[in-house]
Image (spheres, grey):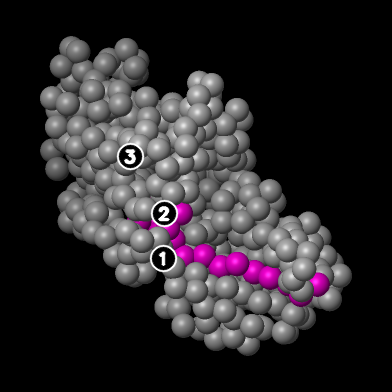
C-alpha cells in the first residue's frame, strides 16, 4: 500500500486525517465520561443481578470484570494520548474491542446502546483500512437513524413513550395536548419521520449539511425532553445524545474551523483488506431487520425509545416480603392493597442503582427474576409474567404466567442465549 489512502482536503473542507484525529479524541473524551458515570455496571457489583450473554460465563470470576474495565480505561486514555499515531491507535482499539466483548459476555445488561455503538465504531477502526473508516462510520450512523425510525413506526410508541415525549416538549412551552388529539398524533409522528429524513439526507453530499443540522436540532430537542426539566433521564442517556451531536459534526460537517488540527496524514491501518469492514457493515445493516421475529435483540437493532420489546413483570408474595433485603426490598411496590402480591419494580431498580435503563429483553429479565428467587429462597412465593413483543399495529402482547421458580427456570431454558444469572458475585451479605 503506497500511501494512507486518505484524501487531501480542499481549502474549505477538513482532511480525512484531521477528522480521524479528532474522532479518536472525541471517542476518548466521550468514553471517559460515559464509563465514569456508569462504572458500577462494569464491575462485579452486587447492586443488581448480572445475567451473562453466554451460559458458560455464569461462573466467570469477578477479577475478569475488573481487568477488562481497567483495559477499557487504559485504551481510552491511550487513544486520546496517541490519536495521530496509527500503530498505538490500532493497539488501543484492539484492547478496547476485546475488553468490551468480554464485558458484554459477562453481563448482557452492559449492552447499552451507546456501549454497543462504541464497540461497532472500534471494530470498524480495527478491521477497515484507513480510507474506508469514515465511509463505514457514516453508513453506521445512517443505519442507526433508519432502524430507530423503523422501530417507532409502531402503535405502542404512539400510545406511550411517543406521547410522553411530545407532551413533555409542549410542557416546556406552557402548552398541553390531549392524548387522542390529531395534533398529538402529528407531533409524535415527527419523531420517526425526522429520523428517516436525517438518514436519507446524510446519504447524499448535496443534503448532508442540512441533514447534519437536522440531527443537531433533533438531539437538542431530545436533551430538552430527557433533561432535568423534562423526563429527567439518567446522565448516560444525556451524554450519549450530546456525543451523537459531536460525532455527527466530526463525520458529516464540512467546515475547516471545526477541525483545527493540521494533521499531515495518518498512517494506514494495519489491515489493508476491505472485506472484514464491509462484512461488518452488512451485518449491522441486515441484523436489525430480524428483531421483530426475536432473532436479534431490541437495542442492538436500534430500537431506541421504543417500548415494544418483550418484558417481564415480577411479583413477590406478601408473606415472603420480609425475606427481601436491600437494595431489592427498596423496589417492592404495592399496586393493589387487596391483592396478596407485591410488585418488584426491576426497571426502577436498574435506573436508581446502576443509573442505566434495564436491558429490554424478556430473556434478561427472566434471569433477574431467577436471581431474586434463588437468593431469597422464594420457591412458590415468586410469580413472573412474561410479555412478548407488542404487535406493530395493535399493540397486543402475548402473556405467560410463571408461578414459582421452576416455571421461571423452564422459561429461561427456552432461549437461545443465556437467561440464567451469574453465580460468582461480589462478596457481601446482600449479594445477589
Judge by depth and name the residue closer to the eye, 267 or 17: 17
Secondary structure, mark 2, is helix
Instruction: Tell me the crowding category of disc 2: few under 14, some 14 to 19, or many 20 or more residues within 10 angstroms, Cα based.
Output: many
What residue lies at 49% left-to-right and 52% top-to-bottom? 112
Residue 329 image position (x, y, % from top left): 79, 62
In the rendered structure, the answer to whether residue 138 lies left or right of residue 78 reads left
Region in magenta: 297-318
Image vertical order of residue 216 relative to residue 143, above or below: above
Residue 188 image position (x, y, % from top left): 38, 39
Q: Is residue 301 highlighted in magenta?
A: yes
What residue lies at 54% left-to-right and 21% top-to-bottom? 174
In this figure, which residue is indicated by the disc labeled 2? 156
Which residue extends farthest right?
Answer: 322
In this figure, which residue is indicated by the disc labeled 1? 396
Residue 392 image position (x, y, % from top left): 33, 59
Q: Quadrant of residue 417?
A: bottom left
Q: Is residue 49 visible?
A: yes
Image vertical order of residue 323 relative to residue 155, above or below: below
Amino acid at each position: 500500500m503506497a500511501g494512507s489512502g486518505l484524501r487531501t482536503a480542499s481549502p474549505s473542507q477538513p482532511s480525512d486525517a484531521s477528522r480521524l484525529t479528532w474522532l479518536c479524541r472525541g471517542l476518548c473524551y466521550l468514553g471517559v465520561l460515559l464509563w465514569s458515570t456508569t462504572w458500577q455496571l462494569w464491575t462485579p457489583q452486587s447492586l443488581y443481578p448480572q445475567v451473562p450473554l453466554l451460559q458458560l460465563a455464569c461462573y466467570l470470576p469477578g477479577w475478569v470484570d475488573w481487568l477488562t474495565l481497567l483495559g477499557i480505561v487504559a485504551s481510552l486514555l491511550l487513544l486520546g494520548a496517541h490519536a495521530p499515531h496509527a500503530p498505538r491507535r490500532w493497539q488501543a482499539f484492539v484492547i478496547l474491542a476485546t475488553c468490551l466483548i468480554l464485558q458484554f459476555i459477562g453481563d448482557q445488561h452492559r449492552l447499552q446502546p451507546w456501549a454497543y455503538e462504541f464497540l461497532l465504531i472500534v471494530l470498524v477502526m480495527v478491521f477497515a483500512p484507513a480510507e474506508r473508516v469514515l465511509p463505514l462510520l457514516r453508513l453506521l450512523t445512517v443505519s442507526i437513524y433508519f432502524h430507530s425510525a423503523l422501530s417507532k413506526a409502531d402503535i405502542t410508541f404512539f400510545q406511550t413513550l411517543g406521547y410522553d415525549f411530545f407532551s413533555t416538549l409542549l410542557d416546556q412551552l406552557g402548552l398541553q395536548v390531549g392524548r387522542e388529539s390529531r395534533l398529538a398524533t402529528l407531533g409524535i409522528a415527527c419523531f420517526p419521520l425526522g429520523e428517516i429524513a436525517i438518514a436519507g439526507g446524510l446519504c447524499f453530499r448535496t443534503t448532508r449539511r442540512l441533514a447534519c443540522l437536522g440531527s443537531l436540532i433533533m438531539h437538542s430537542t431530545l436533551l430538552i425532553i430527557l433533561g432535568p426539566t423534562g423526563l429527567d433521564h439518567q446522565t448516560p442517556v444525556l451524554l450519549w445524545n450530546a456525543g451523537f451531536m459531536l460525532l455527527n459534526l466530526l463525520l458529516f460537517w464540512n467546515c475547516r474551523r471545526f477541525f483545527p488540527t493540521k494533521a499531515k496524514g495518518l498512517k494506514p491501518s494495519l489491515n489493508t483488506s476491505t472485506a472484514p469492514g464491509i462484512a461488518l457493515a452488512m451485518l449491522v445493516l441486515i441484523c436489525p431487520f430480524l428483531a421483530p421475529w426475536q432473532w436479534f435483540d431490541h437495542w442492538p437493532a436500534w430500537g431506541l425509545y421504543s417500548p415494544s420489546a418483550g418484558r417481564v413483570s415480577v411479583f413477590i408474595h406478601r408473606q415472603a416480603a420480609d425475606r427481601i433485603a436491600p437494595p431489592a426490598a427498596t423496589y417492592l411496590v404495592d399496586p393493589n392493597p387487596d391483592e396478596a402480591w407485591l410488585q418488584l419494580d426491576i426497571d426502577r431498580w436498574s435506573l436508581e442503582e446502576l443509573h442505566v435503563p434495564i436491558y429490554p429483553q424478556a430473556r434478561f429479565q427472566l434471569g433477574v427474576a431467577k436471581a431474586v428467587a434463588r437468593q431469597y429462597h422464594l420457591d412458590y412465593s415468586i410469580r413472573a409474567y412474561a410479555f412478548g413483543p407488542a404487535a406493530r399495529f395493535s399493540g397486543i402482547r402475548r402473556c405467560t404466567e410463571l408461578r414459582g421458580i421452576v416455571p421461571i427456570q423452564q422459561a429461561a431454558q427456552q432461549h437461545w442465549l443465556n437467561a440464567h444469572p451469574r453465580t460468582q458475585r461480589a462478596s457481601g451479605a446482600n449479594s445477589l
